[in-house]
Image: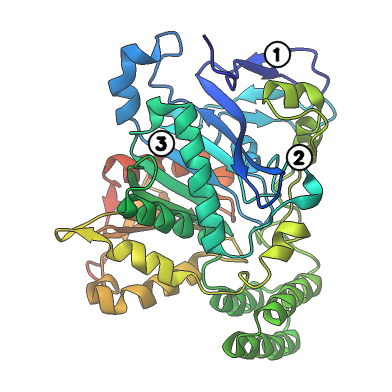
Amino acid sequence: MDPDDLVTSIPANLLDTKSLELGVRSYAGRVQLDGTGTAKNNLFYWFFESQTCSPHVPVADQQDLISATPLVIWLNGGPGASSLIGLFLENGPLTITEDTVGTVSLTTTSWNQEAHLLYWDQPLGAGYSHSDDPKHDEYVEDEAELGHMFWQALQKFFQLHPEYAKCPLYVCGESYAGKYVPAIALEIDKQNGRKAGQHIDLRGIAVGNGWITPELSLGLMIDYVYTTGFIGLGQREELLRDYAKVQAEIKEGSMVQATKDGNALVDKTLAYGGNFDIYDARGWKGLPWETLKAYLNTDPVRKALHVPLGLEWTCEDNSGPVADALVEDNMADASDKYGALIDRSDGGIKRYKVLLYTGNFDTACGFRSTEEILDRLMRDRDPEWHGAPRLIWQQPPGDPKGFVRQRGNLTQVSIPDSGHEVPAYQPETCREMLYNWLFERPFHGHDPQGPLA
């Protein structure tokens, strides 16, 4: 008997004139979590089995292969963004044309080529994730609350699909998920230690262009846009005065005001620069997703994905009720969570792998902020990180795919010719990076100078 959340096909366009067969085992729906009242909270997921497994062979006959295959969770940020943005526009098995037809097709660069892939709309209020009574959505207000709700949702998913419960798990995401991912990982680690619920075989985390230390990222944003010519000297000086005010508010613990003034600083910077794309300094428009929004708000799609007919799919980038609830979290520093994960060990062996990667044209939270965050984190943990070799990851006929630094359980990758959403701009390179990290395959290249001074 097929599971209630099985997805075999979806509408192949906005008009629902054709169906698209997915070609792998796929499950979608919402898990129910108890709320504070009579309404239930529901978090939406969409799962795609690895292409290394056959959808025509019963699970029981290939359970060893299924359990040995990594399970990668993907989370978009916002706050308020749906992870279906990642599914359709970045690293998933599906893509959609940005036109009146909205044709959906399979991609060749999906991360589920060699790994199971699980997308979640979270926290509550993002995407299809809402309570039974949307007027009473219980929006999370901090990362601890978010992490616990997500752990509960994972427990529900593994109850529905125990065949994936023993898979090595990797929690991945980008942007504001730079806060979500380590918080979720630490909650899983805590609950595993308490032996609560289903043990989750967490192996590591990966974050692209993470919003981790906002105070640092804001200051570096001003430097970046000045260096690239989007603002002049006088405007830079004015923005730095605004920035000093935000810094003082963070120091005082006035986090609501710091978030308000930090957002105003970003808006002013963009206005001075002609409203360039903050996520890709090379252009003026972000990733197009209006057609995707129209597609996901059709009832044939909702029916295929087992969500209530008429339920609105929502997606926000640092606005709306999800962001409003996280207003005190927005400007908080999350780098200590990465330090905690890097430090976790069993008998001297590091417990978790950590990957941080960046696209070099991101203005919001790009390479330099990640570089300096890691330098601060590793200064006392491993002083040799500062001078560790930085490999030029090559591709024929010799142009760099990226720049890689690896030491212990920490990997850092910078990918050129990419904006904020690295899998969208460099899909093949980004998938190869992920698989090199997951399966401990070498990044082929050379160290041009040897250890840095």
Q: Amino acid at mark 1?
A: Ser
Q: Amino acid at mark 2?
A: Trp
Q: Can I make out residue 360 in this image?
A: no
Disc with the residue nearer the chain's start (1 vs 3) = 1
Residue placed most toward the observer, 286 or 191: 191
Front position in the image: 61 or 158: 158
Q: Secondary structure at mark 1?
A: strand
Mark 2 = which residue? Answer: 313
The x, y position of residue 447, in whole percent, is 26, 60
Residue 440 is left or right of residue 150, and the answer is: left
Apparent side of residue 432 relative to residue 95 in the rendered image (left or right): left
Front residue of this view, candidates 372 and 446:
372
Q: Residue furthest toward the left? A: 347
How far separated are the C-alphas under marks 1 and 3? 27 Å
Specify whether residue 329 is in view.
yes
Quarter of the rendering containing residue 335: bottom left
Label 2 crowd (10 A; few <14 / some 14-19 / many >=20): many
Judge the density around disc 1: few (<14), some (14-19), many (≥20) Cα neighbours within 10 Å. few
- Which disc is residue 19 wearing? 1
Residue 152 drawn above or below residue 104: below
Examine the rendered structure and indicate whether residue 252 appears above or below residue 303.
Answer: below
Give the CA distance from mark 3 to mark 2: 25 Å
